[in-house]
Image (tube, rainbow, N blue to C red):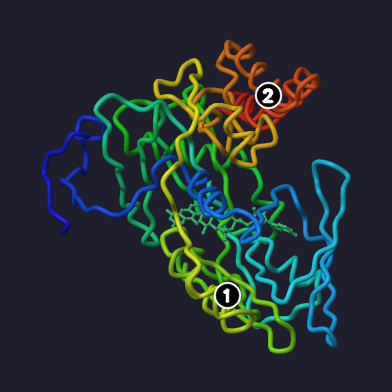
């Protein structure tokens, strides 16, 4: 039950002015990260029941009305290989890309996505910071959060309506200015651009009617999911939703698939499962053991250096400059990881990664210092 607290462990970390205590409440948290949570849904199922293909695009889909089958052209984005598959039903759950894929495959729908960009800063976590802190912004019902996560605390998010996916793929200077300003309004320590360990940027896909006119602050839009089945062809589109409601959403879609394809599917288990016994390894600067690169390569569809640093571990979000370190001190450790995934091309793969760090992190933060 929510309770009122005048003092709490983190009282010393926040601005004294205007602080009138807090409500404490509990909800759910993910064990390791959102990326590993998503991964567990896939690793729990092995062929023939399930066959997860990452780096695989659905390039086109044609429906054969006579056979009542979809013919799918799949494209491997890492290699050059293509493949053809057949399907009795397609579930388009491609997040912000749902509308794009529907258009590409000729599917019309009464719904679409409105897009809202959200950015977080990863700041060094302060001693005594145990619980997520949520600050009321006083406008639009908006809040800012400061969530402890390993050696960092995530400060954010922003909430910006955008009209294309491209506009939300990376943070910009105005996002970072806003986040630094609000952090300095609420946190007792001073936070500057040089303190930023990492950046997270995502696009919220919000389900709206097709004729929605983007005239509202995105927080006013519902975060609920909508599942829409096409009337003519076996194609289900999934709009909106959140991680917190994803089990219910999955169960709803599963029963629709069962009704259409095979009742046996209704009993298939879904959801987060415990990690199997995994091989662990260490990475400089991170206290806790991490799944080893070899383990992730052999058991978790991990194909690239970036997969490992960003999606199988939190290295690129917990250590400065996407894991390289302030002064490139982790370069040798990254090269050892790159060798597991890229073999003889490890040095070239690491160089590409360094270029990415320069454009996505270094230049953005350097520009911020100049602005000031
Ligand atoms: C800033 C921010 C804060 C959030 N906070 C919360 C929160 O506090 N709580 C909460 O519950 N939720 C939160 N969410 C929402 C949550 O992150 C999303 O609901 C969730 O990530 C959506 O997952 P998804 O699987 O639907 O889409 P995605 O994770 O986007 O997955 C879609 C997948 O489809 C793939 N794809 C796209 N096109 C194709 C194609 N043509 N062929 C093959 N594959 C394709 C993509 O590569 C991608 O892997 C937040 C989101 C953001 C952006």
- In this rendering, is residue 251 above or below 173? below
Q: Is residue 72 left or right of residue 92?
A: right
Residue 234 pos. (x, y %):
70, 81
Q: Secondary structure at mark 2?
A: helix
Q: Is mark 1 within 8 Å of ligand 1?
A: no
Query: Which residue is at a point 73% across and 47% down the rendered structure image?
Result: 55
Q: Secondary structure at mark 1?
A: strand
- In this rendering, is residue 218 above or below 123? below
Of label 1 and label 2, which has the lower sequence position?
A: 1
Residue 355 pos. (x, y %):
74, 25
Query: Which residue is at a point 59% across and 41% down the rendered structure image?
Result: 300
Q: Which mark is residue 208?
A: 1
**Location of ligand 1 given as a quarter of the image:** bottom right
| Residue linked to disc 2 | 340
Query: Which residue is at a point 50% across and 28% down the rendered structure image?
Result: 279
Foreground pick, 198 / 219? 198
- In this rendering, is residue 80 above or below 363? below
Foreground pick, 145 / 79? 79
Q: Nearer the viewer, mark 1 or mark 2?
A: 2
Foreground pick, 226 / 192? 226
Image quarter hosting the C terminus? top right
Image quarter hosting the N terminus? bottom left
Foreground pick, 341 / 309? 341
Residue 284 pos. (x, y %):
49, 15
Circle 2 packing at 10 Å, graded few (<14), some (14-19), many (20+), is some
Residue 215 pos. (x, y %):
57, 71
Q: Is residue 65 left or right of residue 369?
A: right
């Amino acid at each position: 039950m929510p309770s009122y607290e005048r003092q709490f462990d983190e009282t010393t970390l926040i601005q004294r002015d205007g602080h009138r205590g807090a409500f404490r409440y509990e909800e759910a948290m993910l064990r390791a990260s959102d990326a590993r949570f998503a991964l567990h849904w896939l690793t729990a199922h092995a062929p023939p029941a399930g066959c997860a293909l990452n780096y695989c695009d659905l390039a086109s889909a044609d429906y054969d009305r006579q056979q009542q089958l979809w013919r799918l052209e799949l494209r491997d984005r890492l290699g050059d290989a293509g493949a053809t598959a057949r399907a009795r039903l397609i579930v388009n759950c491609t997040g912000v890309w749902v509308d794009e894929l529907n258009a590409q495959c000729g599917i019309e729908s009464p719904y679409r996505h409105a897009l809202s960009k959200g950015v977080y800063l990863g700041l060094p976590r302060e001693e005594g910071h145990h619980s997520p802190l949520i600050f009321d912004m006083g406008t639009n019902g908006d809040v800012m959060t400061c969530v402890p996560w390993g050696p960092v605390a995530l400060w954010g998010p922003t909430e910006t309506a955008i009209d294309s996916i491209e506009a939300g793929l990376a943070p910009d200077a105005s996002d970072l200015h806003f986040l630094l300003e609000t952090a300095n309004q609420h946190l007792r320590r001073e936070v500057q651009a040089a303190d930023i360990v990492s950046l997270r940027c995502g696009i919220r896909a919000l389900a709206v009617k097709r004729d929605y006119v983007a005239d509202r602050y995105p927080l006013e839009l519902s975060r609920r999911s909508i599942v829409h089945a096409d009337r003519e062809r076996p194609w289900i589109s999934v709009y909106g939703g959140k991680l917190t409601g994803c089990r219910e959403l999955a169960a709803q879609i599963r029963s629709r698939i069962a009704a259409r394809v095979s009742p046996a599917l209704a009993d298939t288990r879904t959801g987060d499962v415990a990690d199997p016994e995994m091989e662990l390894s260490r990475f400089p600067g991170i206290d806790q053991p991490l799944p080893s690169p070899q383990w992730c390569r052999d058991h978790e569809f991990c194909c690239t250096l970036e997969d490992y640093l960003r999606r199988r571990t939190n290295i690129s979000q917990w250590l400065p400059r996407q894991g390289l370190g302030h002064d490139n001190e982790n370069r040798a450790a990254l090269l050892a990881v790159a060798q597991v995934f890229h073999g003889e091309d490890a040095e070239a793969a690491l160089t590409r990664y360094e270029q990415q760090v320069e454009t996505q992190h270094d230049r953005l933060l350097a520009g911020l210092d100049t602005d000031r």
